[in-house]
């Protein structure tokens, strides 16, 4: 299993797979060859179909400054990839094929990005549980034994989560002209009379900052960035110790990492269950951990968090990470609290029938059966109905 650090990446919105990943790929290319005279970038799959709405072309251009660049959107291949060609004096210097794997991770055919380096020896939660029992370890000690410097990274991630929500809560105005969408986070907070309403406002603040293309933190993606961030901000406002928040991010990150390993955190590959569902699972595990729950209860909370998002489609209207994405973040953070409560209460009266590994395997099976039209292509679902309604 790969590093938990990679679950929490900081970068420009609105999509980890469409902005962070292409920007990282272009930056790698430039770092290898310097700034060349000309570039041609071909986008495929979801990178092409929703690339305009996700500002993929704009973020790519940032890496090459004012150099000549041609970006082509190709709709005949559904593989979520980009092909980068660099030229000097009209001669091809090199050509890379880059896959966007979700959460900002990439795979380059000619270069080791470091994203797929194995850090943990275990690949599912049942094996981790056995290891903990055999070595008399708790979950946090296990994580830090393989990533001893993790807290340093998580501290930066937490700082960004708090900053992005602060920014979002203090911003107003038109966010998207085509959708006639105005920012609402500040107004939501003003109207909030209870904790649930405040959590929704925080989730909207992060989501709106992401949609604006500003700097935010994945958890595990940018499309789902408001779920864990709103939980962290809420607990931070309540006075929870920073160390406890970092511990919770580590524990939640482990569950997100297991989903990434055994299913997907990419909306283009697995639908929105892979993004919002995973984030809800992570947040539920964090809540249980902070409630000092036993390992079985933490696992149960994480399992409930993903189980009831199975089959959730990814169908962003007009390709923007706004509708239904931002609202789904607000819904999911509340569901994370419900998942933790269900786990706590039900384990008092019965043993859980479905373990975390089983529901993740089911998530992968479900993803394989979701049609491509409902996997971040904007060719089906709400996106299609909206277009028909506007015609």
Image (tube, grey):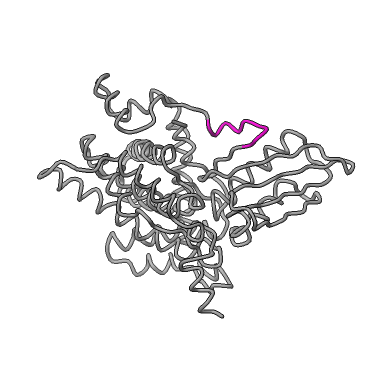
In the rendered image, residue 40, in percent from the top left (x then y), is placed at 76, 49
Magenta residues span 108-116
Q: Quadrant of the N terminus?
A: top left
In the rendered image, residue 383, in percent from the top left (x then y), is placed at 50, 68
Seen from the viewer's position, the closer of residues 337 and 323 is: 323
Q: Is residue 122 above or below residue 154?
A: above
Q: Residue at x 71, y 35 (%)?
A: 31
In the rendered image, residue 296, in percent from the top left (x then y), is placed at 22, 36
Q: Is residue 164 magenta?
A: no
Most common SS among magenta residues: loop
Seen from the viewer's position, the closer of residues 198 and 241 is: 198
Q: Is residue 64 above or below residue 165?
A: above
Total numbered circles: 0
Q: Quadrant of the C terminus?
A: bottom right
Residue 377 placement: quadrant: bottom right
Residue furthest out toward the left: 349
In the rendered image, residue 80, in percent from the top left (x then y), is placed at 58, 49
Residue furthest out toward the right: 89
Seen from the viewer's position, the closer of residues 359 and 161 is: 359
Residue furthest out toward the top: 135
Q: Residue at x 37, y 56 (%)?
A: 311
Q: Residue at x 64, y 58 (%)?
A: 75
Q: Is residue 146 above or below residue 64?
A: above
140 with respect to 118 (left or right): left
Q: Is residue 333 above or below residue 151?
A: below
Q: Residue at x 45, y 46 (%)?
A: 265
Residue 128 placement: quadrant: top left
373 with respect to 352 (left or right): right
Seen from the viewer's position, the closer of residues 328 and 43 is: 43
């Amino acid at each position: 299993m790969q590093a938990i650090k990679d679950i929490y990446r900081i970068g420009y919105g609105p999509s980890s797979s469409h902005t962070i990943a292409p920007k990282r790929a272009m930056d790698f290319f430039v770092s290898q060859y310097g700034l060349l005279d000309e570039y041609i970038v071909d986008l495929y799959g979801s990178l092409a179909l929703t690339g305009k709405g996700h500002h993929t072309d704009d973020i790519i251009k940032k890496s090459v400054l004012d150099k000549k660049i041609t970006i082509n959107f190709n709709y005949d291949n559904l593989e979520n990839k980009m092909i980068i060609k660099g030229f000097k004096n009209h001669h091809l210097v090199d050509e890379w094929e880059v896959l966007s794997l979700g959460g900002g991770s990439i795979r380059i055919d000619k270069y080791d990005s470091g994203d797929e380096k194995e850090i943990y020896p275990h690949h599912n939660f049942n094996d981790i549980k056995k290891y903990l029992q055999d070595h008399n370890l708790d979950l946090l000690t296990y994580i830090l034994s393989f990533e001893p410097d993790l807290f340093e990274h998580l501290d930066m991630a937490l700082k960004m989560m708090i900053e992005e929500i602060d920014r979002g809560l203090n911003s107003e105005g038109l966010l998207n002209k085509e959708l006639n969408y105005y920012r609402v986070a500040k107004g939501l907070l003003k109207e909030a009379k209870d904790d649930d309403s405040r959590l929704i406002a925080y989730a909207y603040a992060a989501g709106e900052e992401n949609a604006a293309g500003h700097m935010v933190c994945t958890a595990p993606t940018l499309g789902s960035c408001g779920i864990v961030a709103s939980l962290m901000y809420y607990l931070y406002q309540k006075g929870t110790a920073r160390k406890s928040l970092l511990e919770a991010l580590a524990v939640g990150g482990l569950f997100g990492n297991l989903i990434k390993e055994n299913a997907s955190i990419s909306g283009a590959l697995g639908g929105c269950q892979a993004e919002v569902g995973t984030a809800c699972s992570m947040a539920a595990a964090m809540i249980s951990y902070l409630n000092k729950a036993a390992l079985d209860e933490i696992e149960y909370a994480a399992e409930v968090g993903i189980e009831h998002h199975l089959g959730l489609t990814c169908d962003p209207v007009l390709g923007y990470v706004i509708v239904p994405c931002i609202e789904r973040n607000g819904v999911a953070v509340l569901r994370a609290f419900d998942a933790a409560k269900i786990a706590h209460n039900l384990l008092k009266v019965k043993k859980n029938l479905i373990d975390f590994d089983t529901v993740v395997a089911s998530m992968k099976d479900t993803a394989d059966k979701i049609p491509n039209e409902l996997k971040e292509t904007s060719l089906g679902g709400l996106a299609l109905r909206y277009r028909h309604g506007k015609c």
